[in-house]
Image: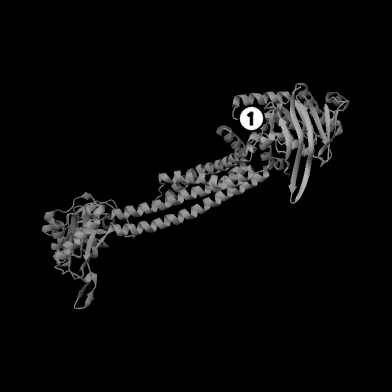
Amino acid sequence: MSIKNLLKIALAALLRNKMRAFLTMLGIIIGVASVIAMLGIGQGSKMSIQQQIAGMGLNLVSVVPGSQQRGGVQFGASTMQSLKENDVNAILSDCPSVLAVTPEVRGSGQVVFGSANWPTSLYGENESYLQIRERSVQSGRMFTDREITSASKVCLLGATVVKNLFGAGADPVGSIIRFKKVPFLVIGVLSPKGLNTFGQDQDDLLLAPYTTVQKRVLAITYIQGIFTSAIDSKSTDIAAKQIEETVRRQHKLKATDQDDFSIRNQTELLSTFSSVSDILTVLLGVIAGISLLVGGIGIMNIMYVSVTERTREIGLRMAIGGKGIDILLQFLTESILLSVTGGIIGIILGIVASKIIGSVMAWPVIILPGSEILSFAVCTVIGVFFGWYPARKASSLDPIDALRYE
Amino acid sequence: MNTLIEIKKLKKDYYVGEVTVHALRGVDMLVSEGEFVAIMGASGSGKSTMLNILGCLDKPTDGAYILDGMNISDLSRNQLASYRNRKLGFVFQSYNLLPRTSALDNVELPLLYNSSVSAKERRERALHSLELVGLLDRMHHKPNQLSGGQQQRVAIARSLINDPVVILADEATGNLDTRTSFEIMALFQDLNDKGKTVVFVTHEADIAKCAKRNIIFKDGMILRENIVSDRILANEMLATIPVEVDI
């Protein structure tokens, strides 16, 4: 039998029972639509976590003081004063995989402008901060090397601070604000960055030269952390290794000594979060996959009923010259048509549903281009798999018995 | 006259559990081209088994069945299907039309299983068949929109579409009233006059008298054979049966 005739026969048979065909397809439609939507949501959340972590600086390698033993007593990491400005310079000159370095000192307190005040954090950095943290200046300018050397009382504000001190949309550049009674000239505003993965507001900060924060606010000589940017995201491990060697040499540690600092990079964080959202995606996908399986069983069930119900039709088709293979192919084609048509509708519905969920719930939803093709292939396989047994049963009927079937 | 059907010492056994049923116990039969044969017999006489074998739906246990020069016993299941498709036309008691399918599509059905016939030719031949049975004006009607007699005529049109060497009818008038039965027989007689060979099974004596020759089966063997001397011409018979009028 030609493929054209086969399709004509199978299509005509399905169209004789439009409502039933539609209801049978419904299982596949819902299954495929949920697979597409669930994978879309899973992919979307993974992507957004990745973007946020990348936004924190994917190339970021940080050095923080580590816990240390002195005379048998283990001291807490945050109390250590082991990191110095010299370490920063050494890292910059000795680590070829490091692109940029900034020291960091932090203080928190109330920032005051006129009658307004706001609790925030003051970050002391150098001019490489913007590059390392992947931030930019929205208005005004960044402080200069000279201002760092001279410990100038200049600062940049985050958007949240601007909003709370000056009101939304105001331009604070040129104003004088006070942080812990120290006056700062506002020279710029940072571009907003929103919340990070942990829900912290990344715009609630004051940025000043680290020397200013060290000398004029905190009155310390050590630094609380070193942040570096590797030349690319693949080099963070090498950079971390180089930094470790450099800092150990700087700190004159013996081979048997523990590190008095610790090094972190974002790739670990990224892989942790990625694996969490991968698990989420797999879980959603499995649930959706089960509904697809149920849809497939629905097809099998209906094809079974159909074979029994149409026994006389099968007998007739065999009597007038239909071979076993023709009958087999007819029923197989019917089930493939059901599953593939259901699959196409399901793909469209799934994409539409994803977009609606994405816009209503404000979730990022990403439809991977492969997922439609995969769903389509899965539907064809379902059609063949669940159609095979009923079709096999139909084709093995004896025409005489089938014609007499009541 | 060329011999169309040649049956020699044909036997058919069925095995039901451990019991062997001898449905046919040595049948010899000849049907020539252009004949009109009625096979009669009580139930269990083997006439249905005979028709199944004549229709190439079943193979004999022993003996030979030669249809249009081909020994059926030599053919495989698939070859039998193709042979039926090209050589035979079937008419059943319960019409066996596809539901919710137009008369035209029903008539076209056998040719869908013959890939050498194009869609255009298929349509032309279906229209011609419907014309032969006088239902051209009903070609788009579905079975449930047709009377029993009309449905049977659609089935006859379907049996004609592949230009079969023989039309096999199994109790084709069994579900119809007397008048409609004779209408169908008139159609068969008309087709027979045009040269079609017709073999049908019936248990109604009046209907059997419409044929030219009767073969009576009993206990799996031919009891007797006779040329119908007082042949009923269905058209003449119809004139004597009043048309039922709705009151």
Q: Residue at x 66, y 40 (%)?
A: A314
In x, y percent, where is residue A321? 65, 34
Q: Which quadrant of the figure has residue A143?
A: bottom left
| Viewer-closest of A148 and A355 | A355
Asked if residue B158 can be seen in this view, the reply is: no
Q: Is A162 on the left-hand or right-hand side of B139?
A: left
| Viewer-closest of A300 and A40 | A300
Q: Disc 1 designates what residue?
A: B111
Relative to residue B170, is residue A232 depicted above or below? below
In x, y percent, where is residue B175? 79, 36
**Mark 1 is on which residue type?**
Leu
In x, y percent, where is residue A115? 25, 61
Q: Which quadrant of the figure has residue B148?
A: top right
Asked if residue B214 can be seen in this view, the reply is: yes
The image's colouring method is: one colour
Q: Dot 1: within a 10 Å radius of its alpha carbon, few (fewer than 14), some, or many (20 or more) residues?
A: many
Asked which secondary structure carries label 1, the reply is: helix
Q: Which quadrant of the figure has residue A112?
A: bottom left
